[in-house]
Amino acid sequence: MESVLPGDAEAGPHRGGLNRAIKESLRDLGAQLSLLNHRVGTRVELKDADLECLDLITRYGPLSPSALARRAGLHPATMTGILDRLERGGWIDRGRDPADRRGVVVRAARGRGAEILRLYLVDSGMNTAIDQICAGYDDKDLQLLAGFLRRTAEAAQTAAERLAAR
């Protein structure tokens, strides 16, 4: 991979075009992942926000409803409705917070997650597609891509927090 040094006069316009192409590709990726998430949610009768919250609970739980609302960027009253729907559907369990018996935590219910995983990993073909894409890169390139995506996700989180603070 050819590196471009900052200040390289010849690389300037080319670098700008690459930056624009990456930003456009990230926008396309966001739109396609949003569509995939919507289709998965439709298959399991979950609204988009409900599926997103379920993913956060699965990845970071158990969580208090207020911690989940902060992570999802949602108002606590909105979170109550989402948690009620997820609990009625058997997707989550609510229980006492072991650290503070007065508090409540939510966790993903056992068993239901396999249904969603199957849709993402098998039925949609997404898992196989990503494996095939990754097979075209060596370990060093994959480390670079993983770092780029992690840093991009962190930048998006920072940007969302900045907007929420205003």
Image: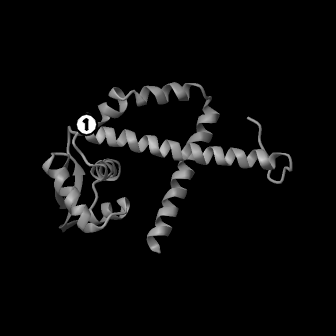
User: Across the whole image, how many numbered discs are drawn on residues?
Assistant: 1
Q: In which quarter of the image is the N terminus?
A: top right
Q: How crowded is mark 1: few (under 14 residues within 10 Å), some or many (20 or more)?
A: few
> Disc 1 marks which residue?
43
> Front-most of 86 and 39?
39
| Rendering colour mode | one colour
**Which residue is at 20% across, 60% downward?**
81
- Label 1: element kind: helix
Residue type, label 1: Arg
The answer to whether residue 81 of the structure is visible from this angle is yes
Residue 98 seen: no
Q: Where is residue 4 in the image (x, y as percent from the top left)?
A: 78, 45
**Percent from the top left, x then y, of residue 13?**
78, 48
- Viewer-side residue, 100 vs 109: 109
Residue 72 position (above or below residue 136): below
Query: Which of 29 and 104 lies nearest the eye of the viewer?
Result: 29
**Identity of the residue drawn at 53% across and 49% down:** 150
Left or right: 41 as drawn, with respect to 89? right
Q: Which percent across, then down, holds residue 64?
A: 26, 62
| 57 to the left or right of 34 | left
Residue at the outermost bottom position? 166
Residue depicted at 50% across the width and 42% down the height: 29
- In this view, 114 is above or below 28: above
- Looking at the image, which residue is at 46% across and 44% down? 31
Q: In which quarter of the image is residue 83?
A: bottom left
Residue 38, percent from left and from top: 33, 43
Where on the picture, by quarter, is residue 68?
bottom left
Work out which residue is located at the far right of the displayed protein and give it: 9
Q: Is residue 114 left or right of residue 14?
A: left
Furthest-left residue in view?
Answer: 88
